[in-house]
Image (spheres, rainbow, N blue to C red):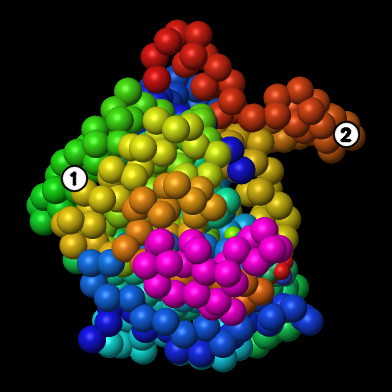
Amino acid sequence: MPLLKVCGLTKKFYGITAVNNVSFAVNTGEIVGLIGPNGSGKTTLFNCITRMLIADQGRVLFNGEDISNFKPAQIAQKGLARSFHFIRVFIDLTVRENILVAAQHHQQDNDLEQIFRTKNSRLLDQEILIKADKIINFIGLQGLTNEKAGNLSYGQRKLLSFSMAIIFHPKLVLLDEPAAAVNPTMIKRIGEYIRTLNQQGITFIIVEHNMEFIMGLADRIIALDQGSIIADGLPRDVQHDYRVQEAYFGV
Amino acid sequence: MKAIKENKYSIFLIIGVLLLVSILPLLVNLPFVLHVLISTLMYIGFALSYDIVTGQIGAVSLAHASFFGLGAYVTALIGKAIGAPFWLNIIIATILSIGLAIVMSLPAFRLSDLSFSFATLGLALTVQLVVKNWVKITRGPMCIHNVSNSSLWFNGILEISRTNLIAYFYLFLMVDIVIIILYRLISTGRLGRTLTAVRNDEVLASSVGINIQRYKRLTFFISAGIAGAIGSLWAPYISVVCPDYLSMDYTLNLLAIVFIGGSGSLLGVVGGSILLTVWPELLRVTPAFRLIIYGLFLLIFVTSIPNGVKGIISNVNKRLKIN
Ligand SMILES: Nc1ncnc2c1ncn2[C@@H]1O[C@H](COP(=O)(O)OP(=O)(O)O)[C@@H](O)[C@H]1O
Ligand SMILES: [Mg+2]
């Protein structure tokens, strides 16, 4: 059984068909690269899978369960995480608090326990705090642990939002252009990080324009053009596919 | 809405100041001064309850006076029917206010942002209209006069006469301390982080598994319950309950307090309450110029100090290099 199965997903905006009858499946342990020229529907596809947008047609199965009618928060709780094309962080929270808040909704204690700081609740606090600090060290933001996320640079926000997507041990992570506008050292670090997590069993679908980065990282590439899948296969094959070449370079 | 980092110890600062204030009645036993102090304490609790929903989670409700008014009416009516002790009145008022909040949340929380505010405005006006026109129970615009005094036990046993201003002062002080502690527990820790996250970015919040609707409802219900409790305490003190209690005037006062003081900040909201209650009360001495001076004061304050009391405090913090 594939981890993610997308069946005939379609999304139209007024006249434009942003996602056109897209079907594919992703197995546990894969790193899938999703490529395509600007406006080919990659972000819209992510939005429809996570129900930030409601698709006009099609179904999404996650871990065998139909999540087509779930709310975004429910989907996250099932273990499907994502990052955003336009980086989002909680600006009034510190770096550490951002990571904590991303992890804490996967814990089992109720609001009253949290308000009155019961022993159980304090133990859970301690647990995620350790996890959060570990991840902060790993991404190299330890000097900024107590800095408000609103004061971070773009690259630092990117690392932070990336940590927030993976802190709650999701099964599948959708990353929207994690390497765009990031300096080469940082890109390398993100790449290594993704590989480490993948070895720990986390599956990735990554939208990326940086060909060197994505071709080196992905086991498999899916190419979109004008909302439709035009190629799906090994990185080498897809890169040399004439339809992909045509879509990118118009040759 | 930008929140400014608050000193960890602000709660101790505030409770310390309140304890200092608590000896004031023993020094100046003037009815006018005591009335100003009691009004200020009432507004501190009322504004903090409002800030839980408006400042913390960022849902600007315009229905907050409804809960205050409901608490006041319920207490006045219970007083006419049976003499219940003040704490039982508070419990009943709190439960009924939460009940009203639940009813209001059914339509209002389907909407977000501005439409939510307008929906709560519509609901608040409806509730006030009902109270104004349900003359048989509420006496409508004729108001309920001579609300029974607060008492510690049934049938007026251990009654606190409203001429005993010192007793009311300490009653409100105690209730405020409870509200301040509750506010602190809600606005910090895991729950506090969740509320800030929802206020900052609902899309990102939902992507990390936060059920936004659930937390909006939770804060709305808690804040409504506290407002009902405050209304329940206020009615016997002020002795008359009118439909005005549910009017937008109260909600607008709260909006001014919260945004001039600094939304989402304990010190800011307490500072705003003091500023906006003491001033207008003092200006009563010159009734002719009262509204003009108050208006000018607001204008100057808002234009010259954009971050409110909270901004002043954080500037002082920065200078002192604590934080
Ligand atoms: N919210 C929206 N409203 C209208 N059109 C949209 C919206 N989001 C995306 N589109 C359109 O859908 C198409 C696909 O966009 P997008 O998914 O952002 O592409 P990509 O991420 O591959 O660059 C584009 O033509 C874009 O203009
Ligand atoms: Mg995109």
Q: Element under label 1? A: helix
Residue B261's place in the image compared with B227, above or below, is: above
Q: Position of residue A160 (x, y in %)?
A: 39, 42
Is residue A229 covered in magenta?
A: yes
10 Å crowding of disc 1: few (<14), some (14-19), many (20+)? some
User: Label 2 amino acid?
Assistant: Ile
Task: Find residue B292 and name its label.
Answer: 2
Question: Is residue B259 shown to the viewer in this render?
Answer: yes
10 Å crowding of disc 2: few (<14), some (14-19), many (20+)? few
Q: Residue at x 34, y 53 (%)?
A: A217
Q: CA distance from mark 2 to mark 1?
A: 57 Å
Q: Quadrant of residue A121?
A: bottom left
User: Label 1 amino acid?
Assistant: Lys
Question: Badge 1 sits on which subunit?
Answer: A
Quick check: which quadrant has ligand 1?
Answer: bottom right
- Where, quadrant-wise, is the C terminus of chain B in this rendering? top left
Which residue corresponds to mark 1? A131
Q: Element under label 2? A: helix
Question: What is the residue that sits farthest to the top in this orientation?
Answer: B320
Q: Residue at x 23, y 72 (%)?
A: A28
Question: Badge 2 sits on which subunit?
Answer: B
Residue nearer the viewer, B134 or A64: A64
Q: Is residue B279 left or right of residue A160?
A: right
Magenta segment boundaries in residue numbering = A228-251
Question: Is residue A88 shown to the viewer in this render?
Answer: no
Q: Position of residue A232 (x, y in %)?
A: 44, 75
Residue B184's place in the image compared with A108, above or below, is: above
Residue B271's place in the image compared with A191, above or below, is: above
Q: Is residue B224 left or right of residue B59?
A: left
Residue nearer the viewer, B253 or B255: B255
Q: How many marks?
A: 2
Q: Residue at x 51, y 48 (%)?
A: A210
